[in-house]
Amino acid sequence: MLRLGIIGTNWITQQFISAAHETRQYQLTSVYSRHLQTAETFAKDYGEVAIYTDLSTFFASEDIDVVYIASPNALHYEQSKQALQTGKHVIVEKPAVSTLKEWEDLLALAKEKQCFIFEAARNIHEANFQQVKELLPTPDKIEGATLSFMKYSSRYDLVKAGEVPNIFSPKFSGGALMDLGIYVVYAAVALFGKPTQVQYTARKIKTEVDGMGTLIFHYPDFQVTLLTGKIIDSFLPSEIYLAEGTIILDAINSIESIRYFDRKTQEVTVIDVEKEENPMVEEAMDFANVMLQPTKGLYQKQYLYWQDLGRIVHEIMEQMRLENDIIFPADRKI
Amino acid sequence: MLRLGIIGTNWITQQFISAAHETRQYQLTSVYSRHLQTAETFAKDYGEVAIYTDLSTFFASEDIDVVYIASPNALHYEQSKQALQTGKHVIVEKPAVSTLKEWEDLLALAKEKQCFIFEAARNIHEANFQQVKELLPTPDKIEGATLSFMKYSSRYDLVKAGEVPNIFSPKFSGGALMDLGIYVVYAAVALFGKPTQVQYTARKIKTEVDGMGTLIFHYPDFQVTLLTGKIIDSFLPSEIYLAEGTIILDAINSIESIRYFDRKTQEVTVIDVEKEENPMVEEAMDFANVMLQPTKGLYQKQYLYWQDLGRIVHEIMEQMRLENDIIFPADRKI
């Protein structure tokens, strides 16, 4: 059983705790919030849970094996570092870091401390995503893809009113690519591998981050178009184009429907999906497996794979941001 | 009544003749084909129709007011020129020309000969397209769009077998952009105006034309992503993003369903559409109106608008091709 401490008292933290408990591999023991009352209100649903308003005291706790971090993006790196330094495993919400260098730093520190660090890019852990991956033929039979995830954030109302909410603030490593975009980037890299070249045409908003944009990933024999945005609502499905047909997904994040169009027969086959009600259960289970059975070959291999995936993803994220002059404080530290 | 001569004996010519007859403004009088038997077989469904296998004799005919041209793309320009020189009006399938210069030449020649030339970009003439256009708010309330038209051409099977069918041949001004792509380019320009900047990331195939690709059109306050392809099958709808909701179209070519998602109420409204069974009826009627009532203000204005639209479209098409090193024989003549 993994004793769980959490940073952040948002709905996503509640959803992660539910998922963690559902796996029966975690038990929430500790809650951190800057404000005592917020922490108390949050913790009261979870029985006997320690409450912290001081981060160092929280990290010093003997009752925590793994910390789940869902603070604003720009705080992830320092908090992950502190957690690792006190010998805790870390599960950090995507984007785990603001730059590739931060990711490399955290991986090195985790290794040194014999801890694990996981980026909670939940979509690639879902059973349905794995199923799509298994449907893929060899790369020479792939002709391309269009992957899309665009949803309006109500916090854009604040931007229109002249404010700068974290999610749209360069100071907090915000913007569409960092928020929903990272899901499509993870999906593309997990499905098709590292692209040979990337392009990002961002539409910047007045807070100096990207509100939406279109990415193109080049591969030796095909190209993939990715659409992301936080300032509009889209209902576009995602599609993977094969030499002999098309795989149609209702979404690339939290896939609920997979269909295959066969060009020869012109028939559409519905492929069965298995969907957890809570989309964070699969990642929570994946991470628990590694932490609880670190010597098992399969789990070692998975962990190395996620490290590499993160490397490719954050290299791409950084390059695409910088090409669009989206600058974070973390960039100045490199 | 407009006496109609046709060049090309493909299914699209049959469809245009049906549409033209449906408007009751045209009467087919003449058919041209290089091969007598093809022409005879084609003409036998249409009663008393003259048959030509010599193009000069066809153009010299006194029984033709307007020529509809549906030959391979690279022949459009010379055939249109010949038709105009003999005082015929011209309706030419899209792409009407291979370069902007050819379009300008044809417009000038038509003016000199007091004839009209029309590019049969049928989607912008459809009642449903007009309806979408009317739904659009002022540009400051537009946040972007994703417009898409990708369909596998069975002639790509021939490319795989080592052949170079016209539609995929640079010699015949082929490729995805010239074929299906021009519909999305026309739609974007008709809906949003001339972009300030364009980008085209083409995936080239072994015949040295584009098999598919992604275009980005930049406007002062938003950007539009266009997807086109002839080597894969896509079922993606098209979407227009507004400040307060999203317009969802089942397609941007031959629109059969228009829905509006209102962000505030989260409700989807189905907007009534009126669809001609034959998607060429509306353009045939539009063109007939100009030819039959050339002095009417509305029709004069429409004709000028189509000329300008064609100028913008062909300027973009040419620039995007050249940036992707897709070179046609027509480029060498400039």
Image (cartoon, coloured by chain):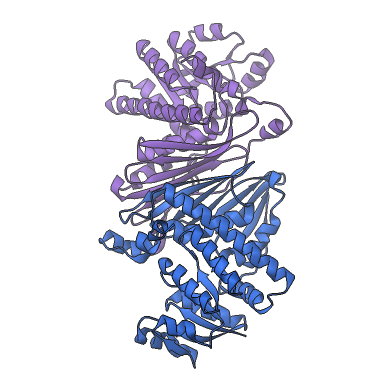
Chain colours: A blue, B purple
Q: On screen, B90 above or below A120? A: above
Q: Quadrant of residue A40?
A: bottom left
Of residues B321 and A28, the one drawn nearer to the viewer in this rendering: A28
Placement of the N terminus of chain A among the 4 image quadrants? bottom right
Is residue B1 visible in this depiction of the protein?
no
Residue A139: x percent and y percent? 69, 47
**Which residue sits at x=64%, y=17%?**
B39
B97 sits left or right of A260 in the view: left
- Total marks drawn? 0
Of residues A7 and A231, the one drawn nearer to the viewer in this rendering: A7
Residue B267: x percent and y percent? 40, 63
Of residues B224 and A85, the one drawn nearer to the viewer in this rendering: A85
Residue extending furthest left? A162
Of residues A300 and A272, the one drawn nearer to the viewer in this rendering: A300
Q: On screen, A211 above or below B20? A: below
**Which residue sits at x=54%, y=73%?**
A91
Residue extending furthest bottom? A48
B163 sits left or right of B6 in the view: right
Q: In which quarter of the image is residue B196?
A: top left
Q: On screen, A89 above or below A238? A: below
Residue B234: x percent and y percent? 58, 46
B239 sits left or right of A204 in the view: right
Is residue A293 visible in this depiction of the protein?
yes
**Which residue sits at x=45%, y=35%?**
B185
Q: On screen, A22 above or below B154? A: below
Placement of the C terminus of chain A among the 4 image quadrants? bottom left
Residue B274: x percent and y percent? 44, 44
**Which residue sits at x=48%, y=35%?**
B183
